[in-house]
Image (cartoon, rainbow, N blue to C red):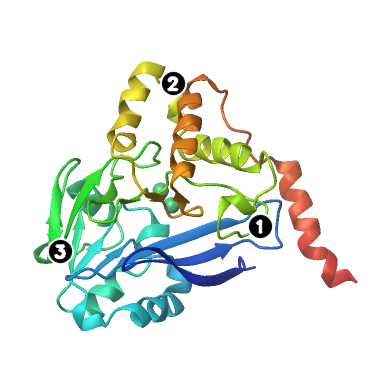
């Protein structure tokens, strides 16, 4: 059994900033899972996260429609989870000028499978930046996250903040913009998904959490987009921050149980019986 995956049309999030978008699980259950990566066609091109190993080849084709492998200078890994690192070794093979930008704990955690070449790594820690020609890109911890290694990436030139797993939204279908959702779906899907990603958020002191939110919020990003939801633009970004503020007060997320799994299995089997 394989999970269905489909590529959506590549989106432009800002000048020379592109989202390569996949959607997982269509037709399987009540929600779908977006998986985005980003390409910044800066003077020194940057690939931000590297997708899934199961769709590595078509993903590489999408990337190289935007940028020539010889021109790729930076590969930014927001963290070491496998849905963000799927093609990193292939990119290093195909892009001889590329350096991986990440943090040392990510490298160590990935080394359980394979060690990144240490002479092709640039370490950035929270608040530190690197230059990609005309862009200064700053590593900043996102509002929610599922790994101690997670750092988003803020582009000072365009105001785009790459949020890794944060700003994720479970939706009933793939959409280009949250304005396509039915009323209430954004709120419900957003709060559910943040708590799935960050179960620790319910343990936080609301005032301390608000100070954490301010790291990114005070930048007033023009666009906030992570790997698992549509790009939020303009006022949508602040709408999301208002929802983040609620997280410390909420109970844990609802989890999928055995009965839901059995319904899913029955739905998958049903067409084969017809
Ligand atoms: Fe993650
Ligand atoms: Fe992820």
Which-is-in-front pick, marks 3 and 2? 3
Q: Which residue is mark 1?
A: 173
Which-is-in-front pick, marks 3 and 1? 3
Measuring 15% from the left and 64% from the top, which residue is drawn there?
A: 134
Can residue 231 be seen here? yes
Q: Where residue 217 sits in the image (x, y, percent)?
A: 34, 35
Q: Between 67 and 227, which is closer to the camera in this rendering? A: 67
In the displayed structure, does residue 171 sit left or right of residue 94?
right
Q: Earlier in the sequence, mark 3 or mark 2?
A: 3
Circle 2 packing at 10 Å, graded few (<14), some (14-19), many (20+), is some
Q: Between 199 and 154, which is closer to the camera in this rendering? A: 154
Question: Helix, strand, or loop for circle 1?
Answer: loop
Measuring 58% from the left and 62% from the top, which residue is drawn there?
A: 24
Quadrant of the drawing holding the C terminus:
bottom right
Q: Residue furthest right?
A: 274
Quadrant of the drawing holding the N terminus:
bottom right
Asked whether the residues under the numbered discs 3 and 1 touch, taking CB atoms below 8 Å apart as contact, a structural biologist would say no
Measuring 54% from the left and 70% from the top, which residue is drawn there?
A: 8
Q: Which mark is residue 134?
A: 3
Q: CA distance from mark 3 to mark 1?
A: 37 Å
Asked whether the residues under the numbered discs 3 and 2 touch, taking CB atoms below 8 Å apart as contact, a structural biologist would say no
């Amino acid at each position: 059994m394989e999970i269905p995956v489909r590529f959506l049309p590549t989106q432009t999030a800002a000048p020379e900033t592109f989202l390569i978008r996949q959607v997982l699980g269509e037709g399987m259950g009540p929600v779908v899972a977006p998986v985005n990566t980003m390409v910044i066609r800066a003077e020194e091109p940057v690939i931000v996260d590297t997708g899934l190993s199961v769709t590595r080849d078509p993903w590489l084709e999408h990337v190289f429609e935007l940028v020539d492998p010889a021109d790729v200078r930076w590969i930014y890994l927001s963290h070491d989870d496998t849905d963000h690192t799927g093609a990193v070794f292939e990119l290093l093979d195909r892009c001889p000028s590329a350096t991986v930008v990440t943090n040392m704990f990510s490298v160590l955690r990935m080394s359980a499978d394979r060690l990144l070449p240490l002479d092709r790594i640039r370490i950035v820690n929270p608040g530190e930046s690197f230059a990609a020609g005309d862009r200064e890109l700053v590593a900043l911890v996102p509002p929610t996250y599922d790994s101690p290694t997670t750092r988003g990436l803020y582009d000072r030139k365009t105001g785009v903040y790459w949020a890794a797993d944060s700003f994720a939204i479970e939706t009933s279908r793939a959409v280009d913009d949250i304005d396509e959702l039915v009323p209430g779906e954004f709120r419900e899907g957003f709060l559910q998904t943040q708590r799935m990603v960050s179960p620790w958020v319910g343990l936080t002191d609301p005032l301390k959490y608000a100070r954490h939110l301010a790291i990114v919020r005070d930048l007033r990003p023009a666009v906030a987009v992570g790997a698992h939801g549509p790009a939020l633009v303009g006022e949508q970004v602040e709408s999301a921050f208002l929802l983040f503020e609620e997280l410390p007060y909420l109970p844990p997320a609802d989890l999928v149980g055995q009965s839901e799994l059995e319904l899913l299995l029955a739905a998958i089997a049903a067409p084969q019986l017809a």
